Amino acid sequence: MTQQVKVQEFGLSITRQAVLEMQRRNRRENLGRAWYKFSRNPLSIVGAATVSIVTLLAIFAPLVAPYPEHVKPFTDFANASLPPSLAHLFGTDEIGRDILSRVIFGFREALGMGVVVLALVVPVGVLMGLVAGYFHGTWIDTVIMRLTDIFLAVPPLVLALAIASVLEPNLFNSMMAVSLMWWPWYARLVYGLTSALRNEFFVASAQTSGAGTRHILFRELLPNMISPIFTKMSLDMGWVIIIGSMLSYVGLGVQPPKPGLGTMVASGAKFLPDLWWISVFPGLAIVVVVLGFNLLGDGLRDLFAAEEV
Amino acid sequence: MALLTFLARRIFQSIFVLLGLSILIFVIARVMPGDPARTALGARAPQWVVDRLREDMHLNEPLTAQYYFWLRDAVRGDFGISLYTRRDVAQDIAEFFPASFELVLFAGFITAVGGIGLGTLSARYKDTWIDNLVRVLSYAGVVTPAFVFAILLLLLFGLALGWLPAIGRLSEGIPAPARVTGLMTVDSLLAGRLDAFWDAVKHLIMPALALALGSLSQEARITRSTMADNLSKDYIAAERALGIPDRVVMGRFLLKPSLIPTVSIFGLDFAASFSNAFLVELIFNWAGLSRYGMNAMLRKDLNAISAVILILGVLFITVNILVDLIVGALDPRIRLQAARSE
Amino acid sequence: MAASAPLLDILDLAVHFRVYGGVLKVLDGVNFRVNTGEKVGLVGETGCGKTTTMKAILRILPVPPAVIPHGEIRFKGEDILKMKPDRLRKVRGRGISMIFQDPTAALNPVFTVGQQMEPVIQHTSPEGRRLSRRQVHDRAITPLQEVGLPDAERLLRSYPIQLSGGMRQRVCIGMALSTNPELLIADEPGTSLDVTIQDQVLRLLHDLVQKKQTSVILITHTLGVVREMTDRVYVMYAGNMVELAATHKLFSNPLHPYSQGLMKAVPRLTGGGVAEGIPGRIPTYQSPPTGCRFHPRCPHVMEICRELKPPFFKVDADHEVACFLYEGHGSARTAEAGAQ
């Protein structure tokens, strides 16, 4: 359980400094220990490395991609439909664009979607879950939970598709669609955690010492749930990327000629099996990214689970 | 008796959820910019025809009234006309639903048998190469999206090796059997047409596999870890210590408690199946509900979209209730505690 | 003392566990013997290897992590560790039966009591498979009645979760005795129950065992129970047997420093004085102390204790101790070997 050291303002600035220094040292120690534990499992390292590499590729795409201009409208029929070679590691597509470069840029869309969706979904979902769980048994609880039930009543992708289909097809709208159907999962998770934790002593003691609801929710309950929320977030990155790519595949996400991993798989599908590289490499890129996040997430989960002992 | 109360409660809750869902769908559908009547009739239709259709579709009335009309009709099974097929949506659904159902059923069968089988195998030979192989494969299965796997399957078995047909439910040369259930396999058997039966099965294999992959891998992982956990439980040791032969202990006394988590996630897996079916049906050109729904969404065929989502919602809720029942049947603790808490 | 062959004889048993960081050398050459008709106690603190030894006897240790590098477990002359599966199956239940420590964990939560008892009866009765379901069912009723459970029919249809802790314990006892074993292993019976119920359970066990003339291994960390219910006692520490004596001799004259510490740690109602604990903690099995495993905590530790593991020295006819303090008395092994 995290301990929050509250330093009373006695005016003893020396003491405060000493406490802060101790906290900093503790944090460094904890991080060091956490890293040691995390690094024991080689798969987690692979996951972390994969995610880091993909992130770096995405950020530095214009510098890293061999043919960065191929992601803009570009044709070069002389070099079209080339199989993988030294010049074009993943081959070129039917209008001559280098697939490797497009895949690297495609990582931008994938990661971007993950980040944006989680940035929207986590605060909303967590807040809903906290409120519903804290006021467990009251009408607030019922309303919020029924609301999540409604969103969860439909298979996830279907809802995202439905929402995306009524909006104009582009990356932003697909992010909105995915966000709308994703928040209930966090609400559910946090609801369960809050309902369980609110009966613990530290909550009661905070209540009796006059702490306000906001303080209890954000300063007492939430810090104890960071680990499971964080673990879920890292695993979710993978799933969001998959759903995003599925939306792109059917044409509701990234629109051609922009490079989106799902979009590329779709546009290459008609050239199977001859120009197989157009679909297969973006597809494998999706798998690699998702694999990385899954391994990372699993590693984090093992790390946090072990610490609970 | 507790069973009936449980069912009644769940159904009651579900009705609320479905109502909420219907409102959600309705709002989504009506958020659409543009005039649905105009879209239906096309740009060249004269205005008075469009106005007339607007009257018929109640489009000039307040939203709540529109919702009421829509709901009233939906409950009666009238989902309106599809903008694309120009038929009753209800008819469309009746035509395309069995194909999806067959696919999902087949995939579900593969998931159950494959997932539980592989998981058990993995637990039995824990930490040997068999176990490690299954674990790696199931991990790969979990991270690969169904549509990527579908394309890989198509590439390998359909096009490169040519072992399995790539498109549709039945080959061109083979006439379809008389339609009784709509399930190609069942109908062919009923009609005594073995050639159609085998052909249908061959067409089913790849899409069902693509669909089943993710769930199968997930189930295998959970079965394995549950079994491995339960193996070291005292009650297993006790049963062996008291002289019950190992095969009985493993087969019956280990299996039942280990199935509980697996069955529990089956509801979620089923949802995932239908999600994945959307893309798989598209890739394999499978004439099913998901493909129909997919096309409806791309063409903004509002009536069809609403109907498909509603149907899927009902289906999903039903499956979840069924799963809860099965879990209750397997695990007396849940049954008895649920009864006590009511 | 009858010179007949012992019912159960464990010779120099070692059990190691392969875990992530290395090997846990839990049992380090254990010797243990039960004669027919005897009630033998096994005392030691939690974690000293009592349950591991018992599970090794029945070969229900989880075998991937567990490894048995050497040792013999002879039941009526035959080595259990070398038995073929068929023979082993016959020993389990009918020959040796076991009551587990935690009755809640020892009952399968998703099956009724009847569904768990009936296979036991079916597979351990002499008539075996030739019994009809009705007969098996009827035979399940008697053990339940013997352990004092009313309404046995309803009990057979109940799930463990519907029973109280005391009832579950009785069911476990009933199941273990329903096989009419020659040797019953009772692993800390009643520990998880509250004291009054535990007392009832122990009395019940005592009566049943008397009636059926079953040999018993009674594991416990409560000395009072040992004193009342056993003929002989083994004291165990960190994977080794350290003392073995007739019960009254152990209590009147504990020899091993550890046993002495145990006796002192029990609070007395009369005579005043405060109970003392034994300083220190049980060692980790990954890197156990060299020589005698108790030496880091021993108030009488000598140089030799750090280097050599003490063998058993026979101090008296039925009192042996594994401690170099008693070296003068001569090794128990040689004494035994001489006297057949």
Image (tube, coloured by chain):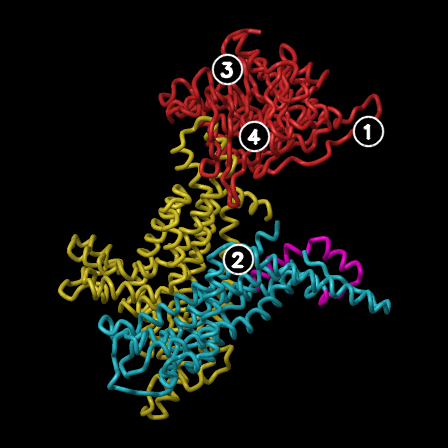
Q: Is residue A206 magenta?
A: yes
Indicate the amino acid at tag 4: Thr
The picture's colour for chain C is red
Circle 3 marks a residue in which chain? C
Is the residue B312 above or below the residue C78 in the image?
below
Q: Chain of mark 4?
A: C
- Labels 2, 1: one chain: no
What percent of the width, then of the height, locates residue A107? 43, 74
Residue C51 disc label: 4
**Chain letter of the residue beneath label 1 in the structure image:** C
Bounds of the magenta span?
Answer: A187-215
Q: Residues within 10 Å of mark 3 (few under 14, many from 20)?
A: some
Which residue is depicted at the point 41% across and 43% down? Answer: B126
Q: Position of residue A6 (x, y in %)?
A: 77, 63
Q: Nearer the viewer, residue C334 or A62?
A: C334
Quadrant in the picture for residue C330: top right
Q: Residue C69 location in percent, x, y?
A: 47, 31
- Residue drawn at x 50%, y 61% is A297
